[in-house]
Amino acid sequence: MKKSDIGVIAIMYVICVFFFAMTVKLPEDAQTYPLCLISGLCVLNTLYLAQCLWKCRRAGFFDDLPQIFNGFLSGQFFMVAFCCLGYLVLMYVAGFYIASLVYLTGVMALLSVPKSHILLTVSLLAVLIYFVFTLFLKVPLPTGILFK
């Protein structure tokens, strides 16, 4: 078992609990899909934990953190983290759809993704999110203070 596995597993359980607490506040009709995703994430994380424990029993425990952060691009990491914060602010102001389109386009451009891939990804995700979440599942998405 690697030392980094402990952090990943713990963070994933915290995320499951956090999203579960938020999901139970949704209307009952809108809870089904998020609860399925959270359950799936929790089950997969538990399977990963079991796999790590099995490997630890066979191969032992070792510290892999120096190897993981070798070649770490701090500028890129902090710029994407800053964009995530901007996404949250923009979602509050302009709503989910506009914020998501701006965020995806901006981060993909920042990471030097080809323009044709950005256009294809952003347009397909916009259509997919609209049909799945708004029309099919009827999940309430943030509209932003500009459009209330």
Image (cartoon, rainbow, N blue to C red):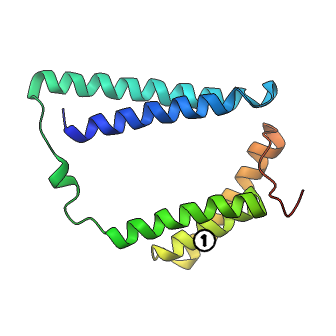
Name the residue at 45% across, 70% down. Answer: 79
Dot 1: element = helix
Label 1 Cα crowd, 10 Å radius (few <14 / some 14-19 / many 20+)? some
Q: Which residue is mark 1?
A: 105
- Say if 17 sits above or below 72 in the image: above
Does residue 32 appear in the picture of this structure? yes
In the rendered image, the quadrant that contains the C terminus is bottom right
Does residue 123 appear in the picture of this structure? no
- Say if 111 sits above or below 124 in the image: below
Residue 140 coordinates in the image, percent (x, y): 80, 42
In the rendered image, the quadrant that contains the N terminus is top left
Q: For this view, does 69 lie left or right of residue 124?
A: left
Name the residue at 71% across, 51% down. Answer: 129
Which quadrant of the figure has residue 144? bottom right
Q: Report the front residue among 98 and 24.
A: 24
Name the residue at 83% across, 59% down. Answer: 145
How many marks the image carries: the answer is 1
Residue 66 coordinates in the image, percent (x, y): 15, 54
Q: Amino acid at mark 1?
A: Thr
Name the residue at 16% across, 46% down. Answer: 64
- Say if 142 sits above or below 62 in the image: below
Which quadrant of the figure has residue 23? top right
Residue 52 coordinates in the image, percent (x, y): 25, 28
